[in-house]
Image (cartoon, coloured by chain):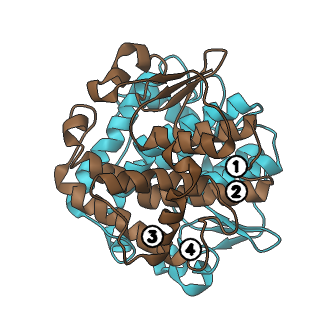
Chain colours: A cyan, B brown
Amino acid sequence: MKFYNSIGPNPKLVRVFAAEKGFELPNVQEVDIMVGENRQAEYMAKNPAAGMPSLELDDGQVIAETIAICELIEELQPEPALIGTTAAERAETRMWVRRVEWKIMAPLTDGFRNAEGSALFKDRMRLMPEASDWLKSCAQDGLSWLDEQIAGRDTIVPGRFSLADVALFAFADFGAQVGQPIDAELKNVTAWFEKAKGRPSAGA
Amino acid sequence: MKFYNSIGPNPKLVRVFAAEKGFELPNVQEVDIMVGENRQAEYMAKNPAAGMPSLELDDGQVIAETIAICELIEELQPEPALIGTTAAERAETRMWVRRVEWKIMAPLTDGFRNAEGSALFKDRMRLMPEASDWLKSCAQDGLSWLDEQIAGRDTIVPGRFSLADVALFAFADFGAQVGQPIDAELKNVTAWFEKAKGRPSAGA
């Protein structure tokens, strides 16, 4: 197997997930997205969506998309479970993963791409710079919603640290670096983030 | 178990998936989203994100988010497999599901909510009507990308009908009703859509 890695929150998400599992990502190959290596023919033959990261299996099949890669790692090495050990647990994790992705991670990313990231992304996708403030506000709305949801608990899925925590952590960490920090008034999410930052996996 | 159903592409996605599996959705309860029943305390106690549909399990746990519900149905009734029978197959399906969701389904939905759907959604989420044309164009960009990807095949995941087909079908069907049809020049996606419309599950 081979893991195609780069800077950015998506590769970090998978690296943190692997670190939490004690799963060693195989044959890490760095791809320089700043010069567009991920948009050249060699990489796009592997992942035609051009996104990072991706995982090449021993038979040559390439799996892209962070959550698909994390699900595969969980199947290859079930313990410690970060998605779940029963169908109901897995369903609950997948529900929360999608909530944080759609409500927070997606608009945060799009807000960045249309503003601070526009020099990098303007030739890679259709942008609308005027929409960036709206997108960032949508991400903050998502964080406010989450702040209410996790009152009284320190994990996104009640009672267990999961892929939902890993996913949001990678993007909250990115947000903090690009002008979209968590509002300090969101006490629960702020405390959750500080705790996630303190885990050994945080620097992965 | 109880299935909370409504109009809209998300419940349809789960109904089509269940129909393809031959899985009978239990105790279907209709929720009238046009009058905001999904935003009243009774439903939000079950799904605090207020989205439709959701599936209440026998122990009272509620699973929301379409793909999480479909994954659970696949676990409850593995055959016929619409996600996969091996870890690699499941990873491949999840990758394609996410590609069509993020590239097509998300901007199509947001384009609708900020334009034709704004009367319904203006008090339910933060909107930016000026962004609707951009969002719709992003969805069309996603369809154009997909059109190249599926050249020479009639399913989104190569060689097998999957959750990726079901998911995009439900939203392409919705798009056709709200002013975002598939561009007829996209021959491959158009042919794919016509074929999906011809399946017995299409009317579910």
Q: Distance between the residues labelled 4 and 1?
A: 24 Å
Q: Are marks 2 and 4 on the same chain?
A: yes
* Callout in the foreground (4, 3): 3
Q: What residue type is labelled 4?
A: Ile
Q: Are marks 4 and 1 on the same chain?
A: no
Q: Distance between the residues labelled 4 and 3?
A: 11 Å
Q: In which quarter of the image is residue B118?
A: top left
Q: What residue is pinned by disc 3?
A: B190
* Residue B31 vertical placement versus A23 (above, below): above
* Callout in the foreground (2, 4): 4
* Residue B29 vertical placement versus B111 (above, below): above
Q: How far apart are marks 2 and 1 (CA)?
A: 7 Å
Q: A174 or B175, which lies in front?
A: B175
Discs 2, 1 touching: Cβ within 8 Å:
yes
Q: Residues within 10 Å of mark 4 (few under 14, many from 20)?
A: some
* Residue A161 shows in the view: yes
Q: What residue is pinned by disc 4?
A: B150
SS state under label 4: loop
SS state under label 2: helix
Is residue A123 left or right of B152 when viewed as pictured?
Answer: left
Discs 2, 3 touching: Cβ within 8 Å:
no
Q: Residues within 10 Å of mark 2 (few under 14, many from 20)?
A: many
Q: Distance between the residues labelled 2 and 4?
A: 18 Å
Q: Which amino acid does label 2 sit on?
A: Ala
Q: Are marks 1 and 3 on the same chain?
A: no
Q: What residue is pinned by disc 1?
A: A71
SS state under label 3: helix
Tag on residue B91?
A: 2
SS state under label 1: helix
The chain under label 4 reads B
